[in-house]
Image (cartoon, helix red, strand yellow):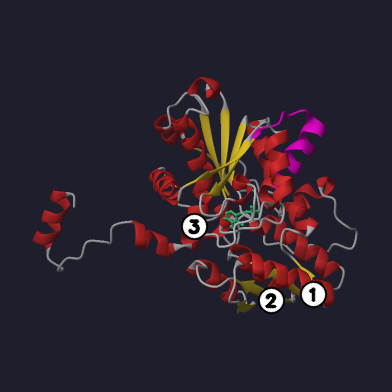
Amino acid sequence: MTFQTVPTYQGVLARYAQYLDIPAHTRPVTLQEGNTPLIPMPGLAAELGGGFELFVKYEGLNPTGSFKDRGMTVAISEAYGRGAKAVICASTGNTAASAAAYASRAGLRAVVIIPQGKVAAGKLAGAVAYGAEVIQIEGSFDDALALVVQISQQQPIALVNSLNPYRLEGQKTAAFEICEALGAAPDWLCLPVGNAGNITSYWMGFRQYHDLYRLGLPRILGVQAAGSAPLVLGRPVEHPETVATAIRIGRPARGEQALEAAEQSGGRILAVSDEEILAMQRRLAAGGVWVEPASAAGLAGLAHELLAGRLSLDELRGRRIVAVCTGHGMKDPDIIAASMPAPLRLEPDVRALEQAILRGR
Ligand SMILES: *Cc1c(COP(=O)(O)O)cnc(C)c1O
């Protein structure tokens, strides 16, 4: 046997340069994001009724723990290449951590604006660790986004929320990876919807590959949390609430495009309860995939539609379904402490331990 080196993977900009609509001044800033696993979930598929193939696109395995890195490498590379000295974003947490990491790497200032309360511990810690200037405002994510849009128009500071088109260029690469792994587009794609940049990106990516390679198009199931479901209600939500803090957004910046993606694809956008989200988080973890609550929403939506009879097992027979799990479970450790039993406490005594094990708790 001969030893072979593998060419180093260089991140989504290098991998997909020819497919991305980006200016020539772009100077790559990468942490080798992307190239995430597409994990088969046969146990969960069987639990949901079986007869179809189910995969999780595990985006929590990106460098800062969420899919935001795919878009951020492109947004920061563009800003850096054009000579920007600072970037700004509003964030429920993951965008902040991602912007902070890529900005630091490029030597740029990162200012991140987070809403009052409910930013998961692992996200805030990330933003701070990577050296961002974190400002919490007494308002919602939507208030924060309105502020950063205004400031970026008045000051030489680059906006890196998904209103920035380069974020979408980067994020669409996840659709390319799925097509390459399956040899075709899946039949269904389920994913959470917050500010709606990601659903827009996936639809762009699948359409682009279909135009080039005739790989088919998925139907898209976009899923919001019931307490933050402006796209289902058809109007903004003033005080969005949900345990899935990454999608706690009442006024999605790309709402129109999300509705279009769902409709054009022959899919839909629906809402699920926090209980359904947390139940799906536990079911995914039982299959070895621990995700943050928002990331379980896509699959919770699939389960919801099956239960409600709006999707039938007949219709899904032989089909391939991909659920996008957007962020890692370690981002939000507190929700586990709040929703799962605490560890058993024992004296350091072998008899006590033996009894506990035999009892199986
Ligand atoms: C940002 C985020 C979402 C929502 O994505 P949008 O592009 O805002 O719709 C979902 N899950 C996680 C973990 C996120 O970080």
Residue that carries the numbered disc 1 in the rendered image: 157
Front tag of 3 and 2: 3
* Residue 201 visible in the shown view: no
Residue that carries the numbered disc 3 in the rendered image: 242
Category of crowding for the residue at label 3, using alpha-carbon neighbours closer than 10 angstroms: few (below 14), some (14–19), many (at least 20): many
Mark 2 CB in 8 Å range of ligand 1? no
Mark 1 CB in 8 Å range of ligand 1? no
Mark 3 CB in 8 Å range of ligand 1? no
Location of residue 290 with respect to 123 vertically, above or below: above
Q: Is residue 330 left or right of residue 238?
A: left
Q: For the magenta stretch, what is the residue range?
A: 200-219
Q: Is residue 36 left or right of residue 306?
A: right
Of the numbered discs 1 and 3, the one sitting upstream in the chain is: 1
Q: CA distance from mark 2 to mark 1?
A: 9 Å
Q: How many discs appear?
A: 3
Local secondary structure at mark 1:
loop
* Residue drawn at point x = 66 percent, y = 58 percent: 251
Q: Are the residues flagged by discs 2 and 1 in contact, CB closer than 8 Å? A: yes
Location of residue 359 with respect to 343 vertically, above or below: above
Of the numbered discs 3 and 2, the one sitting upstream in the chain is: 2
Q: Position of residue 199 (x, y in %)?
A: 67, 46
Q: Are the residues flagged by discs 1 and 3 in contact, CB closer than 8 Å? A: no
Residue that carries the numbered disc 2 in the rendered image: 111
Q: CA distance from mark 1 to mark 3?
A: 31 Å
Q: Main secondary structure of the magenta part?
A: helix
* Residue drawn at point x = 46 percent, y = 32 percent: 308
Location of residue 314 with respect to 72 vertically, above or below: above
